[in-house]
Structure formats: structure tokens, C-alpha cells
Amino acid sequence: MTCPGPRSGRELDAAGITDPVLRAAYGRCRELNAAHGKTYFLATRLLPIERRPAVHALYGFARWADDIVDATGADAGADADDADDGPRGARLAALQQRLDEGLRHGDRGEPVVAALADTAHRYAIDHRHFQDFMTAMRSDLVVTDYPTYADLRGYMHGSAAVIGLQMLPVLGTVVPREEAEPYAAALGVAFQLTNFLRDVGEDLDRGRVYLPADLLAGHGVGRDLLHWCRSTGRQDRRVLGALREFEALTRGVYREARPGLALLDPLARPCIRTAFVLYGSILNAVASDGYAVLHRRSVVPRRRRAAVAAVALARLTAVRLRHRRRAAPMPTPAPAPAPAPPADPTADPDRPVPEEAV
């Protein structure tokens, strides 16, 4: 294991994570987040420093499992097709076993599982969310398309909605958690739908189509046409129509999730609002790019990411100042001066007043 860097060390210190093994484990998860989740990592930097390691752990575990599922060729352990009991299936089964043991007893051997198990314990995250996630990962080994949007939403409960539910205890809420859960789940789904649209071409190369078959068929699109567009670099109006409909469907889920932002702890809102805006900007980038997702990946310009982050940082600064003012102790008022003695009716009115009485 590598030692955490200075920035990571400050985060771990703030979170009260002192065990050297756990510090290295969290450091590994932070590396995964920084390398693979640029938008998400940027948003995470806006969280209170003590909560960041937990988010890195959640992301690191999800990234690790997803990489197993997406591995191909030599990375998968074999060149042949992988079934549920193939090389990728075996690796997922091993991960499942480590996860189960880690959640029950902790884990000192595998860094990502060690950090995840510690986070689950610290924030009392329901273990069912991790089990549902692993079920969705296993289905990716054998399911390559979804007949309807309802079928896709069933899959996304485990692959995306539970990520929002895992995050919620870390973020904190201003209402009972169960009131915010539907919005957190919807936001996880919105993010994944965005990824599905952006990565249509890459997923097709892996043999998967996440756009529902009935949506595609409504525009006269099938796998053969998608493969033709991918291989020739050409576009087709039928495919464009299907992609626009999927974009509209995704924007609807963002609208479904948006009210949940106001239910989060004010200190966490800038982080999630930034992710909300930046992931939504991916949809804008796809549209601006002419829906060329079968040929290249659309990206949000760095200037746009920086501008959104700057706005979020300004909001976060204002929130922190308000919280500091509320938390600051009220100054102790100075004691009131003793009242002057009542006037002596017999005193000489022409006698001078002593200086100390002025």
C-alpha cells in the first residue's frame, strides 16, 4: 500500500482515521476517484473535509467492481466469452466473498474493501445497498440489453439508485432520511442514464445496449443499425431520433431528483449541486456534438467545469460563514454600571460634582 499524500492526509486526520492500514486503504480509494471520476472527484472536493474519505471509499468500491465487469481480453483473464461462472464471474464472486466478510468483521487485506467496510460502519449504511449493487454487477455478465425502460430501471436500482442511497448518510439531511431517499435514488439513476447516453459506442463494443429496445424500435433502430453507424462513422436520422428521446427521458429524471437538493445538509449541497449541474452539462455536450456518441465521447469543457466549481465554492463559503456565526459563542455583555444614589434633598446644590461620578 502507498502512503496517503499531504492532501489526503489532511482529509483522513479530519475524519479521525488514524489506523495506518486504513489510511492507506482510503488513500487507494481516493486515487481511484481522482483517476476515473473527474467530474465526481471535483464535486467531492466541495464536501466538508471530514466526509470526503467516505465518498472516496464508496466510489472506489463501485469503480473496482465496474472495472471487473467491463474487463475484456487479457484483462478479463481469458479471451473467450465470460459467463456468470467465467473469469469475470469468478472475480466478482471473490469480491462478493470479501465484501461479505468485510462488512461482518472488517478487512485488513484488500484496501478498497477495508475502506468500504469502515465507511459502512462509521455511517451506519444499510448493507442491503451493497448487496443490491453486486447483484446488478453480476447481471452485467449475462444481460446485454433491456426490452423496456421498466426493465432498465429494475437494473438501475442496483447499479445506480443504491449509490445515491449509500451516499445519503454521508451527506446528511435536514429532514428524516427516508424522506430524502427517493430523490437520492433518482439522482443516482439520472447520473447513470447520462453515462449510458454518453457511452453508447463504448458499451456497444462490449456487446451491451442500455437504451431500451422498445424505445429504439419506436424509431426503427436495432443493433444492426447501431453497429453499422459505429463501424462506418456515419449517422442515421432514426438513431438520432432515438438518442434525442433518450436524452429527454434522462432530463425528466433530473427534474424528478432536483427537489432533493434542498433536503440535504447545507454543507453538502454545493457538492451535489455541482455534480447535478456538471452531469447535466454532459447532456448539453452530447446535443452540441450532434449526438455523435456512437463515434466519440462528448465531454464538458474544462472552462465550464471550472466555472461551475467556482460558483459552488462561493456558495459553500457563504454557507460556512453562516454556520460559523451561528456556532460562535455570544459575547458576554459588560456589567451595567451601578445606579447613582438618589439625590440628597439636603445637599448644597452649588457643591461641585466629584470627577469619578461624571
Image (spheres, grey):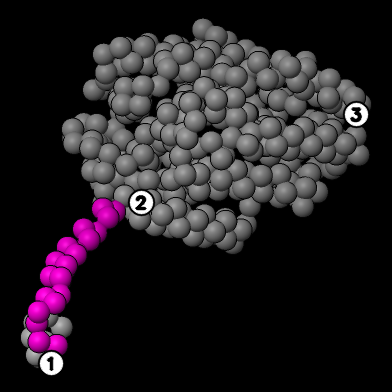
- Three-letter amino acid code of the residue under disc 2: Arg
Residue position marked by numbered label 3 in the rendering? 219
Q: Position of residue 295 (x, y in %)?
A: 74, 42
Secondary element at tag 3: loop
Residue position marked by numbered label 1 in the rendering? 350
Q: Position of residue 80 (x, y in %)?
A: 58, 16
Residue at image position (51%, 7%) is 85
Residue at image position (36%, 39%) is 51
Of circles 3 and 2, which is in front? 2
Whether 238 is among the magenta residues is no
Whether 347 is among the magenta residues is yes
- Three-letter amino acid code of the residue under disc 1: Asp
Q: Cα distance, mark 3 to mark 2?
A: 57 Å
Residue at image position (52%, 22%) is 178
Mark 3: few, some, or many residues within 10 Å (few <14, many ≥20)?
A: some
Residue 158 location, quadrant: top right
Q: For the N terminus, give its image quadrant.
A: top left
Residue numbers of the magenta segment: 328-349
